[in-house]
Image: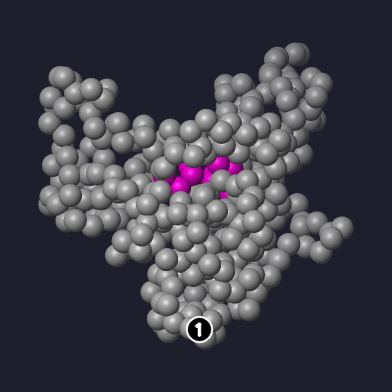
Amino acid sequence: MTPDAEFGYELLVCRYAELAWSPSDGARPAIVARQLGTRQRRWDTVVIEVDPAAFTARRAFGDRALDSDLLHVVRHAPAEWAWYRDALPHPGYPWRHVRKAVHRAAGRDLIETRRRNNRIQLRRRRPYPDWVSRIVAVENKPDLDRSAADRLADQLEHDVETALADEAWLATETTGERVEPALLRKLPVEAGILATDFSEGVHADAADVAWHPSDLSPPEHERRDPETETRRLEIAERAYGRGWRSFHDTMRPDCRHFELRREGRALVPHCATKETVPTSRECSGSCPSFSPEPPGWRTMGWPIEGGPGKGLERVLRRRRERERGRIEGDRVGSDRDD
């Protein structure tokens, strides 16, 4: 059944998107993340549609995200040796910060560096690919009452006006009525509506398109301004590094009550004491029910190195890696449940 908390619903939407995106146009290779955006706007679910060949080229830069400073270096690193100040565009901030980013990039084997005449030179190891095809923003609201619709309307209007994403969607639980209530709310007509039914868990046909979105990308033969393109790429990089299963980073899987429960083809966190899907705020060391794993679980006789909490973290990381491999065409394990 659908978890009570909006956070739990968000995780189910993310897994559905991973299984069945795009709901309106057929299967497209994509990575999925959650709670990403800009200072002005944070999206619940973010779908990054990718070019598979270019995505493989991006994978050569490693599994970690490239922050804005590293992107500035890697995208503009020259094919031949050059002083970094000659090779890179002025960043708009002091060069000493660029120099630090150059050293960080070299430390991660993203570029090559050398010193000549007391100057740091760099050259690229490989070109940084144009791997992002489209960005899709999804707002999740399982119970769309009138007040919630009014708040979402403003947020979706912002998405339509800024066009930072190529599509904007609202995901909401289906009511079974002939006309879904979401269609009667005052929402932007450019935003799509995804009616989900997770009563039997997540699977590839657990949602229907109640309203198709408009394409917010620039007209053909036009491009977004460079600043917007850079912001989109920064979002895509964070999505690549984090994915949507990173909730364990802000929870306490080392609590003996922390579990992963199956919801169809999804795994979601579960508190065995409260019998609910906890939020990050609830699942913390300050929780009255928090009970750390006994030392013996981590050091004596337990078959999972580091204890069950560490084992659950590895399970989630392996599933994130599996989805990355599936995009590259590695079908090994891709048909298994989450």
Q: Position of residue 29 (x, y in %)?
A: 63, 46
Give the side of residue 228 with respect to residue 300, left or right.
right
Q: Residues within 10 Å of mark 1 (few under 14, many from 20)?
A: few
Residue visible at 16% across and 34% down in the picture: 293
Was residue 332 drawn as part of the magenta stretch in this picture?
Answer: no
Q: Quadrant of the C terminus?
A: top left
Q: Secondary structure at mark 1?
A: loop
Q: What residue is shown with label 1?
A: 179
Magenta segment range? 234-245
Kind of residue at disc 1:
Val
State left or right for residue 301 relative to residue 282.
left
Residue 278 lies, in percent from the top left, at 27, 55
**Foreground: 207 or 275?**
207
Q: Is residue 300 left or right of residue 118?
A: left
How many dots with numbers?
1
Quick one: which residue is furthest to the right in this view?
Answer: 221
